[in-house]
Amino acid sequence: ADSTSRWAEAMREISGRLEEMPGEEGYPAYLASRLAEFYERSGRVEVLGTDTRVGSISIVGAVSPPGGDFSEPVTQNTLRIAKVFWSLDTDLASRRHFPAINWLTSYSLYLDSLDEWYRKNIAPEWTGMRKEAMNILQRDDELREIVMLVGPDALSESQRVTLEIARMIKEDFLMQHAYNPADTYCDKGKIYQMMKLILDYHKIMQKAVDENIPLQKVLELPVKTEIDRMRLTPAEKFASFAENIDQEISQQFKTIGGK
Protein backbone atom coordinates (compact mmCIF):
# COMPACT_ATOMS: atom_id res chain seq x y z
CA ALA A 1 0.00 0.00 0.00
CA ASP A 2 2.40 2.68 -1.21
CA SER A 3 -0.54 5.10 -1.33
CA THR A 4 -2.43 4.70 1.93
CA SER A 5 -5.11 7.13 0.76
CA ARG A 6 -5.89 5.19 -2.43
CA TRP A 7 -6.00 1.93 -0.46
CA ALA A 8 -8.41 3.47 2.06
CA GLU A 9 -10.61 4.82 -0.74
CA ALA A 10 -10.77 1.35 -2.32
CA MET A 11 -11.70 -0.09 1.08
CA ARG A 12 -14.47 2.53 1.40
CA GLU A 13 -15.81 1.59 -2.04
CA ILE A 14 -15.84 -2.14 -1.24
CA SER A 15 -17.43 -1.50 2.15
CA GLY A 16 -20.18 0.52 0.46
CA ARG A 17 -20.87 -2.25 -2.04
CA LEU A 18 -21.13 -4.74 0.84
CA GLU A 19 -23.62 -2.37 2.52
CA GLU A 20 -21.58 -2.23 5.73
CA MET A 21 -22.26 0.42 8.36
CA PRO A 22 -20.22 3.48 7.31
CA GLY A 23 -18.07 5.46 9.70
CA GLU A 24 -16.67 8.99 9.38
CA GLU A 25 -16.84 10.39 5.81
CA GLY A 26 -18.12 7.05 4.53
CA TYR A 27 -15.03 5.05 5.48
CA PRO A 28 -15.69 1.69 7.17
CA ALA A 29 -15.73 1.64 10.98
CA TYR A 30 -12.73 -0.71 10.98
CA LEU A 31 -10.47 1.74 9.06
CA ALA A 32 -8.20 2.38 12.07
CA SER A 33 -7.69 -1.31 12.86
CA ARG A 34 -6.89 -2.17 9.21
CA LEU A 35 -4.34 0.65 9.03
CA ALA A 36 -2.78 -0.53 12.29
CA GLU A 37 -2.57 -4.13 11.00
CA PHE A 38 -0.65 -2.90 7.98
CA TYR A 39 1.79 -0.50 9.65
CA GLU A 40 2.49 -2.83 12.58
CA ARG A 41 4.07 -5.32 10.17
CA SER A 42 7.17 -3.13 10.18
CA GLY A 43 10.02 -3.64 12.63
CA ARG A 44 12.77 -6.12 13.42
CA VAL A 45 11.96 -9.60 12.09
CA GLU A 46 13.38 -13.11 12.04
CA VAL A 47 13.25 -14.45 8.50
CA LEU A 48 11.65 -17.85 7.87
CA GLY A 49 13.98 -20.71 6.92
CA THR A 50 16.41 -23.21 8.37
CA ASP A 51 19.11 -20.62 9.09
CA THR A 52 18.46 -17.93 11.69
CA ARG A 53 18.44 -14.62 9.85
CA VAL A 54 17.40 -11.31 11.34
CA GLY A 55 16.36 -8.30 9.29
CA SER A 56 14.10 -5.29 9.38
CA ILE A 57 11.03 -4.09 7.48
CA SER A 58 10.45 -0.38 6.95
CA ILE A 59 7.11 0.89 5.67
CA VAL A 60 6.75 4.26 3.97
CA GLY A 61 3.14 5.11 3.16
CA ALA A 62 1.97 8.14 1.18
CA VAL A 63 -1.13 9.92 2.46
CA SER A 64 -2.77 12.48 0.16
CA PRO A 65 -5.45 14.39 2.13
CA PRO A 66 -8.00 16.08 -0.17
CA GLY A 67 -7.32 19.80 -0.25
CA GLY A 68 -4.52 19.37 2.31
CA ASP A 69 -7.08 18.74 5.06
CA PHE A 70 -5.18 16.89 7.81
CA SER A 71 -8.38 16.40 9.83
CA GLU A 72 -9.75 13.75 7.44
CA PRO A 73 -9.93 10.16 8.80
CA VAL A 74 -7.08 8.51 6.84
CA THR A 75 -4.56 11.18 7.82
CA GLN A 76 -5.63 11.26 11.46
CA ASN A 77 -5.58 7.48 11.89
CA THR A 78 -2.21 7.19 10.13
CA LEU A 79 -0.67 9.87 12.37
CA ARG A 80 -1.89 7.99 15.46
CA ILE A 81 -0.08 4.84 14.32
CA ALA A 82 3.08 6.02 12.55
CA LYS A 83 5.87 7.51 14.66
CA VAL A 84 7.52 9.43 11.83
CA PHE A 85 5.84 12.07 9.67
CA TRP A 86 7.36 13.69 6.58
CA SER A 87 5.29 16.66 5.45
CA LEU A 88 5.79 17.24 1.72
CA ASP A 89 5.62 20.94 0.90
CA THR A 90 4.48 22.24 -2.51
CA ASP A 91 6.12 25.63 -1.84
CA LEU A 92 9.51 23.94 -1.37
CA ALA A 93 8.99 21.90 -4.53
CA SER A 94 8.14 25.04 -6.52
CA ARG A 95 11.39 26.61 -5.24
CA ARG A 96 13.28 23.52 -6.46
CA HIS A 97 14.20 22.53 -2.91
CA PHE A 98 14.46 18.74 -2.83
CA PRO A 99 13.67 16.68 -0.90
CA ALA A 100 10.64 18.95 -0.42
CA ILE A 101 10.09 17.98 3.22
CA ASN A 102 8.92 20.75 5.54
CA TRP A 103 11.37 20.80 8.47
CA LEU A 104 8.96 22.57 10.84
CA THR A 105 5.88 20.37 10.47
CA SER A 106 7.68 17.02 10.06
CA TYR A 107 8.67 15.04 13.15
CA SER A 108 9.98 11.75 14.53
CA LEU A 109 8.97 10.16 17.83
CA TYR A 110 12.07 7.94 17.79
CA LEU A 111 14.49 10.72 18.82
CA ASP A 112 14.57 9.87 22.52
CA SER A 113 14.91 6.14 21.80
CA LEU A 114 17.84 6.76 19.44
CA ASP A 115 19.59 9.38 21.56
CA GLU A 116 22.11 6.92 23.04
CA TRP A 117 22.84 5.45 19.59
CA TYR A 118 23.53 8.94 18.21
CA ARG A 119 25.92 9.65 21.08
CA LYS A 120 27.86 6.42 20.54
CA ASN A 121 27.85 6.24 16.73
CA ILE A 122 27.87 9.87 15.59
CA ALA A 123 29.02 12.24 18.36
CA PRO A 124 28.13 12.97 22.01
CA GLU A 125 27.05 16.50 21.06
CA TRP A 126 24.91 15.48 18.05
CA THR A 127 21.56 15.75 19.86
CA GLY A 128 22.42 19.25 21.08
CA MET A 129 23.50 20.29 17.58
CA ARG A 130 20.23 19.03 16.10
CA LYS A 131 18.23 21.01 18.67
CA GLU A 132 20.29 24.14 17.98
CA ALA A 133 19.69 23.81 14.22
CA MET A 134 15.94 23.34 14.75
CA ASN A 135 15.81 26.42 17.01
CA ILE A 136 17.52 28.45 14.29
CA LEU A 137 15.00 27.26 11.68
CA GLN A 138 12.08 28.11 13.97
CA ARG A 139 13.44 31.61 14.65
CA ASP A 140 14.00 32.04 10.91
CA ASP A 141 10.33 31.29 10.25
CA GLU A 142 9.28 33.91 12.82
CA LEU A 143 11.68 36.52 11.40
CA ARG A 144 10.45 35.96 7.85
CA GLU A 145 6.96 36.96 8.96
CA ILE A 146 8.42 40.22 10.32
CA VAL A 147 10.30 40.81 7.05
CA MET A 148 7.08 40.35 5.07
CA LEU A 149 5.30 42.92 7.25
CA VAL A 150 7.89 45.67 7.76
CA GLY A 151 10.81 44.77 5.45
CA PRO A 152 14.39 43.53 6.11
CA ASP A 153 15.64 46.96 7.24
CA ALA A 154 13.78 46.52 10.53
CA LEU A 155 15.99 43.58 11.53
CA SER A 156 19.02 43.87 13.77
CA GLU A 157 22.44 42.47 12.77
CA SER A 158 21.92 39.51 15.09
CA GLN A 159 18.58 38.71 13.45
CA ARG A 160 20.20 38.89 10.01
CA VAL A 161 22.76 36.36 11.23
CA THR A 162 19.87 34.02 12.06
CA LEU A 163 18.37 34.43 8.57
CA GLU A 164 21.71 33.74 6.88
CA ILE A 165 22.63 30.70 8.96
CA ALA A 166 19.11 29.30 8.47
CA ARG A 167 19.58 29.70 4.72
CA MET A 168 22.83 27.74 4.97
CA ILE A 169 21.15 24.95 6.94
CA LYS A 170 18.35 24.72 4.36
CA GLU A 171 20.44 24.99 1.19
CA ASP A 172 23.80 23.52 2.25
CA PHE A 173 22.60 20.77 4.61
CA LEU A 174 18.95 19.83 4.02
CA MET A 175 18.90 20.17 0.23
CA GLN A 176 20.23 17.24 -1.81
CA HIS A 177 21.19 16.79 -5.46
CA ALA A 178 19.80 13.40 -6.53
CA TYR A 179 22.02 13.20 -9.62
CA ASN A 180 25.31 13.99 -7.87
CA PRO A 181 27.06 10.81 -6.60
CA ALA A 182 28.53 12.66 -3.59
CA ASP A 183 25.21 14.22 -2.57
CA THR A 184 22.71 11.45 -3.33
CA TYR A 185 23.70 9.57 -0.18
CA CYS A 186 25.33 10.98 2.95
CA ASP A 187 26.83 8.83 5.71
CA LYS A 188 26.52 9.71 9.39
CA GLY A 189 30.11 10.98 9.67
CA LYS A 190 29.66 13.49 6.87
CA ILE A 191 26.27 14.58 8.24
CA TYR A 192 27.83 15.42 11.60
CA GLN A 193 30.80 17.28 10.10
CA MET A 194 28.59 19.31 7.75
CA MET A 195 26.36 20.46 10.59
CA LYS A 196 29.38 21.21 12.80
CA LEU A 197 30.92 23.46 10.13
CA ILE A 198 27.68 25.41 9.70
CA LEU A 199 27.25 25.91 13.46
CA ASP A 200 30.94 26.87 13.84
CA TYR A 201 30.43 29.50 11.14
CA HIS A 202 27.32 30.66 13.00
CA LYS A 203 29.43 31.25 16.13
CA ILE A 204 31.92 33.29 14.10
CA MET A 205 29.11 35.39 12.60
CA GLN A 206 27.61 36.02 16.03
CA LYS A 207 31.03 36.85 17.44
CA ALA A 208 31.59 39.35 14.62
CA VAL A 209 28.32 41.11 15.46
CA ASP A 210 29.31 41.23 19.15
CA GLU A 211 32.66 42.81 18.17
CA ASN A 212 30.90 45.38 15.92
CA ILE A 213 32.37 43.91 12.73
CA PRO A 214 30.00 44.49 9.78
CA LEU A 215 28.13 41.31 8.93
CA GLN A 216 28.79 41.84 5.22
CA LYS A 217 32.53 41.37 5.83
CA VAL A 218 31.90 37.93 7.32
CA LEU A 219 29.62 36.97 4.44
CA GLU A 220 32.34 37.93 1.95
CA LEU A 221 34.94 35.58 3.46
CA PRO A 222 36.14 33.02 0.83
CA VAL A 223 35.53 30.16 3.26
CA LYS A 224 31.77 30.76 3.06
CA THR A 225 31.76 29.77 -0.62
CA GLU A 226 33.55 26.54 0.26
CA ILE A 227 30.95 25.77 2.94
CA ASP A 228 28.17 26.42 0.42
CA ARG A 229 29.70 23.74 -1.85
CA MET A 230 30.69 21.25 0.86
CA ARG A 231 27.85 18.80 0.22
CA LEU A 232 29.39 17.97 -3.16
CA THR A 233 32.61 16.76 -1.48
CA PRO A 234 32.86 12.91 -1.42
CA ALA A 235 32.43 11.30 2.01
CA GLU A 236 35.89 9.67 1.96
CA LYS A 237 37.53 13.09 1.55
CA PHE A 238 35.25 15.01 3.87
CA ALA A 239 37.16 14.54 7.15
CA SER A 240 40.29 16.30 5.82
CA PHE A 241 38.12 18.87 4.00
CA ALA A 242 36.25 19.72 7.23
CA GLU A 243 39.51 20.04 9.18
CA ASN A 244 40.91 22.50 6.62
CA ILE A 245 37.69 24.54 6.53
CA ASP A 246 37.61 24.74 10.34
CA GLN A 247 41.12 26.22 10.32
CA GLU A 248 40.27 28.61 7.50
CA ILE A 249 37.23 29.93 9.40
CA SER A 250 39.45 31.01 12.32
CA GLN A 251 42.25 32.36 10.11
CA GLN A 252 40.01 34.36 7.78
CA PHE A 253 38.03 35.78 10.70
CA LYS A 254 41.26 37.33 12.01
CA THR A 255 41.85 39.05 8.65
CA ILE A 256 38.71 41.18 9.15
CA GLY A 257 39.69 42.22 12.67
CA GLY A 258 38.21 39.34 14.65
CA LYS A 259 39.79 38.20 17.89
Image (tube, rainbow, N blue to C red):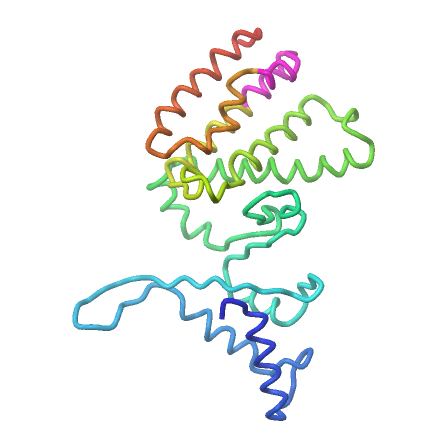
Indicate the position of residue 243 as horizontal and vertical percent values.
38, 22
Tell me which corner region of the image, top left, top right, bottom left or bottom right, holds residue 86: bottom right
* Magenta: main secondary structure: helix
Left or right: 234 with respect to 256? left
Residue 16, how many percent across, how many down?
Answer: 63, 88
Span shown in magenta: 203-220
Q: Is residue 143 above or below residue 202?
A: below
Q: Nearer the viewer, residue 203 or 22?
A: 22
The foreground one among 13 and 218 is 13
Please name the residue shown 43% across and 70% down the image: 40
Q: Is residue 255 above or below residue 161?
A: above
Give residue 139's quadrant in the image. top right
Residue 178, image x and y in percent? 48, 44
Q: Residue at x 44, y 43 (%)?
A: 184
Closer to the camera, 223 or 198?
A: 223
In this figure, what is the number of numbered marks?
A: 0
Q: Residue at x 46, y 69 (%)?
A: 39
In this picture, residue 225 sits left or right of residue 116: right
Q: Does residue 47 belong to the magenta stretch? A: no
